[in-house]
Amino acid sequence: MGGALSDRIGRRQVIALSLLATPLLMFVFLEVEGWARLPVLLALGPVVVSTAPVKLALVQEAFPENRALASGAVMSVNFVVNSLVVVAIGAMADLVGMRGALTACALAPLLGLPLTLLLPRKSGA
């Protein structure tokens, strides 16, 4: 979904949309109760993971001679960072409660939004 959309509207736009939609959907998730959470989660999942193919495409365009190495490095770093973040969120949930930890997780993507301006404007740039 993210890769096909990024081919049409651009990599920066897909990443920015995800960074905006993720907090919105997470805050909706925190406000609704019971079965109403299911459709929110069904929308949130694809939005969150939609940037993975876009990031890989950006890396492959930046390193055309070493695409496999660059992709492997990004995936490795992503795996390690995600593992550490899961532990940190669990520790935060122990300290401030699950709602507080999820609120922090909802706000975190907004911190990356200004960084999208550093991404190339066009594919292959």
Image (tube, rainbow, N blue to C red):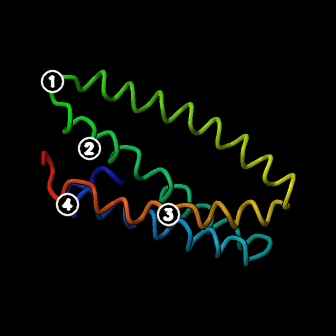
Task: Kindly identify which numbered label has been placed on residue 65.
Answer: 1
First in sequence: mark 3 or mark 4? 4
> What is the total number of numbered labels drawn onto the structure image?
4
Marks 3 and 4 sit apart, C-alpha to C-alpha, by: 25 Å
Tell me residue 14's x, y (percent). Answer: 33, 61
Q: Secondary structure at mark 1?
A: helix
Circle 1 or circle 3, nearest the eye: 3
Local secondary structure at mark 4: helix
Q: Is tag 4's residue or tag 1's residue first in the polypeptide sequence?
A: 4
Q: Quadrant of the N terminus?
A: bottom left
Residue found 39% across the figure and 26% down from its top:
73
- Looking at the image, tell me whether mark 2 or mark 4 is earlier in sequence order: 4
Residue wearing tag 4: 8
The answer to whether 74 is drawn above or below residue 24 in the figure is: above
Tell me if residue 103 comes above or below residue 67 in the rendering: below
Q: Which residue is mark 2?
A: 58
Which residue does the numbered mark 3 point to in the structure image?
Answer: 111
Mark 3 lies on a secondary structure that is helix
Residues at discs 4 and 1 in contact (Cβ within 8 Å):
no
- Residue 62 is left or right of residue 97, and the answer is left
112 relative to 91, above or below = below
